[in-house]
Image (tube, helix red, strand yellow):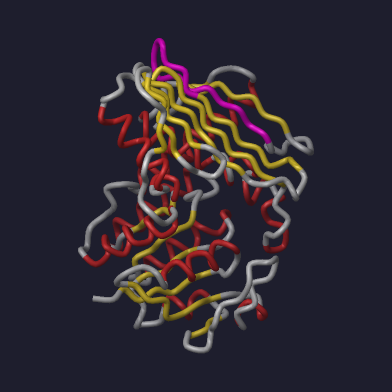
Amino acid sequence: MTIRVGILGLGMMGKFHHDTYAKVKGARVEAICEVDPKKRQGIIGHGFGEINVSKLRVYSQAEALFADPALDMIDVCLPTYLHAKYTVAALKAGKHVVCEKPMARTSAEAKTMIEAAKKSGKQLFVAQCIRFWPSYAKARELVMSGKYGKVLTARFCRMSGLPAWSWENWLHDPAKSGRAALDLHIHDVDFVQYLFGKPKSVLSCAGGLKKGCLDHIITSYEFGKDQLVSAEGAWEYASAYPFAMTFSICMEEATLDMTRDTKLYLYPLRGKAAEVKVPAGDGYFHELSHFVQCVRSNRGSDVVSPESAMNSVKILEAEVESARLSKPVSVRC
């Protein structure tokens, strides 16, 4: 059974997803939908290259894409503030949905998406790709095994130049994107939740290029006594600044470290340090392969449920409030 996919939105992530489906067993992109005429011709722009649209059904209106009877699943790669509206519409049209991260602009919108999925009987998947990224997934496996004891400290970091490629510069509008806190930092917020569960509270500080813009955020998560977990996300650097995601997890018997090139290393208290072997491929491939298999077997994801993706937005909202108030804020999930 081949899952027939329609992609809604051909920005950077739409291009990444289009190219990734070509590698995924049991899936085929059959249609695209995009309001930009150049992108409908396959010209993505901003240095992201082109796609061949000659064998695809091309739509300019989402309603037409959703009405395509040959499609099984819609992949929503629109700007964050449009996620809820079009995900709900696609579900109501009887399609399974993959929605890009973050799940929605607010947790309240995310809740409407979950309710729509339940009413439709269709599957909703949120593309929190870091849960599937090989080095992160392997690190979680090692931590959860308990082989190296309890986690004492963990630090996650994600740094980027200021994005200059978004459609109509929507990423620069806090009301539409949530700036770096919601668009970039959410990756590590989500992985912290995936690894440790819901924190009791968060303590955050933040800064921005302009007043009210969260372009650099540092958060400490409260999980209990004798455990320090933090995450930092920033994108106020010059546009030429090279993107980097890293982490260090110190356990009682060893330290895990992922370097800028995403290689994972284990440093045991006794014995030699060594690189940890991880599966080939990136998080996009592994997540879309997983989602496709879920649809083929008519089941939800056991890696990232819609509820857990919504909770990541709730945790982030607590962080934003903490940064605004300059004090710890309880997490309500």
Q: Over which residues does the magenta segment extend?
A: 216-229
* Outermost residue to the left: 297
The mark total stands at: 0
The image shows residue 75, relative to residue 268, as above or below, that is below
Q: Is residue 45 magenta?
A: no
Q: Residue furthest bottom?
A: 54
Residue 225 highlighted magenta (yes or no) = yes
In the rendered image, the quadrant that contains the C terminus is top left
Whether 104 is drawn above or below 120: the answer is above
Q: Foreground: 148 or 97?
A: 148
List x then y, in percent, for residue 198: 38, 29
Q: Quadrant of residue 207?
A: top right
- Closer to us: 115 or 261: 261
Residue 134 x %, y %:
40, 47
At 51% from the left and 27% from the top, the residue drawn is 155
The quadrant in which the N terminus is found is bottom left
